[in-house]
Amino acid sequence: MQDDLPATELHSRFSVLRRLYFLCICLMAGVVCLTSSLFAQREEQQTPQMPPGPPTVTITKAQTGEYRPRFKPNRNEVTDKIIQQTNSFREKEKLKPVVRDDILQKSAQDFADFMAKTGKYGHHADDQTPGDRVKSHGYEICYIAENIAFQFRSNGFTTASLTKTFFEGWKDSPPHRENMLQPSVTQTGVAISQSEETGAYFAVQLFGRPVSQAIHIQINNPLESEISYQLNEETYLLPPRYTRSHMLCVPATLHLRKNGKVVSSLEVESKTLYTAQIEKGEIDWIKSPLPSETSP
């Protein structure tokens, strides 16, 4: 038997997996997006309540074939390098880096270990959602996203080759790439575990934003008439002399609307009060810090 199977032969061994799915869920926007993939899955959520996810499959030795490794990666170095390369990727896209969070790291490692031990592969392989798992570890979710993947090579991987395979696989897949370049996330956890039965490597990449980093704003209407405003895709009406608070988990653009048209737009800043005003017949926003008694 060859030490390294040709790609076509290796893929044929995984024909049973060709119906895996990505599940992309953004509950705030009410969007469910389902697309097919082979070796990786990705999932995101802004609350722990989710509809049923993609099917779970079981990776067996009959599918992978013999494992006769000549190379053995340092898994800690692989996870460190994946985080470094993810941040370099984000920096090129003018996004802030993510920092490793201990809770997300523990949750990612436990799930990678579960998949490696059982051979079950899927976001719901343990009958939980990503949100369920991180919450059970004590993470207070504002936003959570998860990439998973597995890799097998009969003669094993070096540290560099396993890093490249996982990182570039996620980077080159649009749904995974979207998670890696999600502007709202600030924290991450990356873990890799290996199956003793098959030798396959299972990877989990979590991205999160905790409730403590939520964006808090207030909209104030001191006018004598109702105003209409929009946060991203959601439109609201605010009665005269009312103030409304919003807690956001993703960056947002605040639009002021008049007669069905947007007349003013700005990017929201946390702990800011936005007050509608009319000057010279034109309506616009005035920004000011939230009063200290209302700031979170």
Image (cartoon, grey):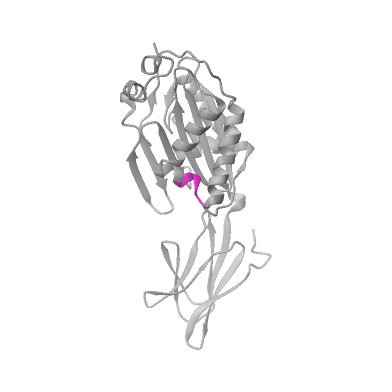
Pick out the residue farthest to the top. Answer: 1
Q: Is residue 106 above or below residue 196?
A: below
Quadrant in the rendering for residue 258: bottom left
Q: Residue at x 32, y 29 (%)?
A: 18
Q: What is the x, y in percent for residue 249?
A: 53, 53
Point out the residue furthest to the right here: 292
Q: Check residue 173 for magenta coloring.
A: no
- Label total for image: 0
Whole-percent x and y of residue 58?
39, 22
Q: In the image, is residue 183 part of the stretch drawn in magenta?
A: yes
- Looking at the rendering, the stretch of residues picked out in magenta corresponds to 178-184
Q: Could you tell me which residue is drawn at 31 percent across and 25 percent down?
A: 15
| Image position of 190 (left or right of 19) | right
Residue farthest to the bottom? Answer: 280
Residue at point 50%, 24% (across, down): 114
Q: Quadrant of residue 119?
A: top left
Give the image location of residue 148, x and y in percent: 46, 34
Which quarter of the figure is the N terminus placed in? Answer: top left
| Nearer-the-camera pick, 67 or 221 | 67
- Above or below, comparing residue 69 to residue 224 in the picture: above
Q: Considering depth in this image, is 164 or 107 the residue closer to the camera?
A: 164
Q: Can residue 140 be seen in this view?
A: no
